[in-house]
Amino acid sequence: MLDKRLEKIAGLVSGRGIAVDVGTDHAYLAAELVTSGRCSRVIASDIKEGPLESAARTVEKYGVTDKVQLILSDGLAEVPMDGVTDVAIAGMGGETIADIIRGLSYDRYEPENVRWILQPMTKPEYLRKALYELDLQIIGEYAVEEGGKLYVIMVAEYNPEFRRLTEFEALYGFFADDDEMGRKYREHESERLAKIAENLSSAGKDNEAIHYSALSEKMKNGVDIYPVNEIYSFLDSVFPFERQEKWDNSGLLVNSGTDCSKVLMTLDIDKRAVDEAELKAADMVVSHHPVIFSPLKRISSEMPVYRLVKNDISAVCMHTNVDISPLGTNGFILRELRKNYELECEPEHINFEECGYICTLKETVPAAEFAETLKKIFGCEYIRASADTGMVKKVAFCSGSGGSFLADVAANGCDTYVTGDVKHDVWMDAQSVGVKVFDCGHFHTENPVIWEFRRILEQRFPRLDVEIAESSVDPCIYF
């Protein structure tokens, strides 16, 4: 009665109570569960009348009409959950399956008593990640080949104490080491990711290409483990820590003494970043802003530093040594401006501190048009700009909070200055010296460097699981 895919799903049903077959179509699975003796009762649901009519013919054919209840339902919306111990959802997209589970509130059932058997037709990585966000742990995963196509089947159960998945883990899945079909699935995914990397490289998107190439390598060979000091030494070779400003505190600020297979990248190591590092079982956090800046006179259990030490998570912070690097924050802005505008001459540093650049555009640009380019570069919705509009020609920029460099900007004859965290007195001074200021925010002018950190690490350590923190977002909202 069943193909290999449905046969595998049937074998994963616990049979402890009532099973639900969501999107039943012809009710073959429901009929098999009853006729095989695995379940004494099954609820078969579908969103459309047509499939339910086919299902009615199937259950009648196999003589199980009294044991299979057919229900017209959008997902589980109309399905009674009393006594349900297994829910099978097969043949739908991963996003649809996740939405069906999200739509079932805890007051309708006992989550700890339900096993989920799920077979997504698309985006299995999305479903895996969503399951863990819904406090469901994948306890088994299998691949079945049918008609030259590989199908993934997941078994998940409630576990509110479990962690969250990184992008790579969501792609890799949870197949047993000796599962030949699982190995074949990963090889196929590795080839798919490598092809994406190749296409991205051809399109000139090198950062993304390196990322997908690293994902392909890990999909094929798994993650590797590296000493923390080896990762730190490599970062030091790219962004020498000895070049940081005297007032700065960049470096290996928390050394857990353990090896590392998973790194979380973030602009700031705050409570949200540490929460995510704990949930994703990261061994190291790499940030731009130092987690320890001023001397600590006391430590409490809520402080990020305390929690990093307690959970054996190392922290490498790269601040002003990155700001002055061609690969760092200001280097990123320079590269993006060059993508959008032709320069009249080679850029120069604003001053001896090398924390920003001066560029002269070959053609003048209206201030409003220039602002739209900045919004695209930094991914920000809003920009504060000088009320005195005009044309943009000679541009200075410094990531982060660069208001103190305004005098240098004016002395170099610049008509425009791009930075963040501009204070009221700087706006007034800029108006006096005839410099247009664009405040794109501290976060937005610096956060893009996190992608550069990932590129550099993945190029050197392709089997290191490098994750950009989902919590590394603008701390402000705008009304």
Image: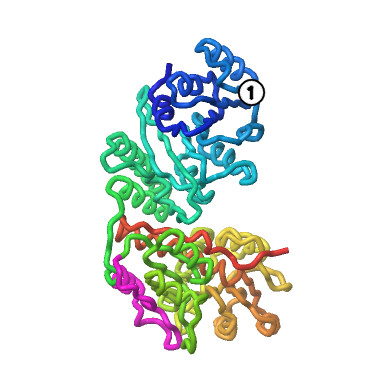
Please report the bounds of the magenta region as a residue range: 231-259
Q: How many marks?
A: 1
- According to the picture, the residue beneath numbered tag 1 turns out to be 48
Across and down, in percent, residue 423 comes to 66, 81
Magenta segment: does it hold 258?
Answer: yes
Which residue is rendered at x = 49% and y = 44% of the image?
A: 126
Viewer-side residue, 5 vs 200? 5
Across and down, in percent, residue 153 comes to 42, 35
Q: Residue furthest top?
A: 61
Which residue is rendered at x = 68% and y = 85% of the image?
A: 425
Please name the amino acid that badge 1 sits on.
Answer: Lys
Question: What kind of colouring is applied to the model shown?
Answer: rainbow
Viewer-side residue, 321 vs 16? 16
The answer to whether any part of residue 343 appears in the image is: no
Which residue is rendered at x = 68% and y = 80% of the image?
A: 427
Mark 1: which secondary structure? loop
Q: Quadrant of the C terminus?
A: bottom right
Which residue is rendered at x = 40% and y = 25% of the image?
A: 7
Magenta segment: does it hold 232?
Answer: yes
Viewer-side residue, 348 vs 55? 55
Instruction: Tell me the quarter of the picture where residue 412 sits.
Output: bottom right
Instruction: Tell me the quarter of the picture where residue 145 sits.
Output: top left
The answer to whether any part of residue 341 appears in the image is: yes
Viewer-side residue, 402 vs 28? 28
4 shown above or below 108: above
Q: Quadrant of the N terminus?
A: top left
Across and down, in percent, residue 176 comes to 31, 42
